[in-house]
Image: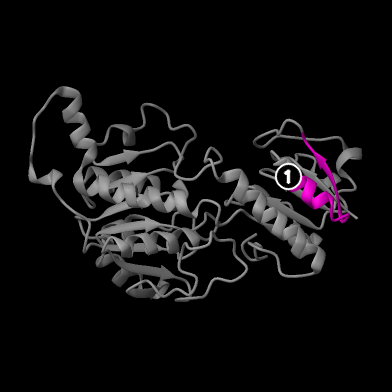
Amino acid sequence: MKKVFVNMRPPPEVIARLEATGNFEFDIVEPHVEGPGNSFGEDRIAEADVLFCDHPPENFEAMKKLSMIQLASVGFTQLAGLGLTEKGIQACNARGVFDVPIAEWNIAMLINLARNFRGMIRNQETGTWDRDARFQNEIRGATVGILGYGGIGRETARMGKLLGLKIHAMTRSGPTTYENVYGIPGTGDPKAELPDQFFTQDQKTEFLSGLDYLILAIPLSPATEGIIGEAELRGLPDHAYVLNPARGPLIQETALLRALQENWIAGAALDTHYHYPMPPDHPLWKMPNVIMTPHISGSSGSPHFLTRVWDIFEQNLERLEAGNTLLNEITPEAL
């Protein structure tokens, strides 16, 4: 029987179903303790085979028997430095849980930016009647570039094609099928059939130069931090917009500020940031060509979050017991 240590809110019906198999013994932190900086008694966690959490405990080294970690987040930088690969510990994230809400945020921002809804709301607040043409644009026919083609990129592409968008995708290795990755039935693009054109990294200049919108849909890692800098922002057409629902530091902060202030690009929609919270005097707040949202495009506040993240965990426990490939397993290279 595997011992499972859980620092995550549990749906009782799932626990009952898993306990009924006789394969798992659960120790659940009640109430769930969010965020980093947690520690638990060594005698409580030393024998755990499986850990389900958003952040590993501060005294992680006490978990001598651990063979698998399931994260409740898509990002996994909290696992850096734990030596999981060397210890033979498999790690899985919550990839797929936020594909739908983040793709919907992407589409909402495309429309908001195209029609300058921020400007219209400012007019509403001052009682200004302004029917200028800048409020009357549409997105149909625009070219949207998606950097990375995982679950969020694929669901954005599916929704975008329904709205008549032209989809370009840039990946490390071109189109790939989606296997052993969690997805909500009926969403996404499992066979990578929707983009009008794929680009690889050596075609970055060509990819960027043809876009009306650039959407970042890659995880933050040492290899991707600062991947969008001055050269990339200058490589976009000056009418293009950048959308970042992924991680703030993917874009170099100084370069982004200059691009927006000096009109290298038309504007940006940012859900992920350089500081948490963003200080109220940060210049991005007041830029008229920027939409700022407080990292809510996909978050644990979603009404579907708990159901989906526990669905991943339940499937992975079953796969672990059967000796099958896990869902959303993070590669040693990414760790």
What is the x, y in percent for residue 198?
A: 37, 74
Nearer the observer, 250 or 25: 25
Disc 1 marks which amino acid?
Glu
Nearer the observer, 292 or 20: 20
**Label 1 SS:** helix
Instruction: Classify residue 322 by image quadrant.
Output: bottom right
127 left or right of 103?
Answer: left
What is the x, y in percent for residue 122?
A: 20, 30
Nearer the observer, 58 or 308: 308
Question: Image point 89% across, 45% down: which residue?
Answer: 46
Badge 1 density bin: few <14, some 14–19, many ≥20, Cα 10 Å = few
What is the x, y in percent for residue 287?
A: 26, 36
Name the quadrant of the N terminus.
Answer: bottom right
26 left or right of 230?
Answer: right
**Magenta stretch in the rendered image:** 14-29
Question: Image point 52% across, 41% down: which residue?
Answer: 302
Question: Image point 43% across, 36% down: which residue?
Answer: 294
* Residue that numbered label 1 is attached to: 13
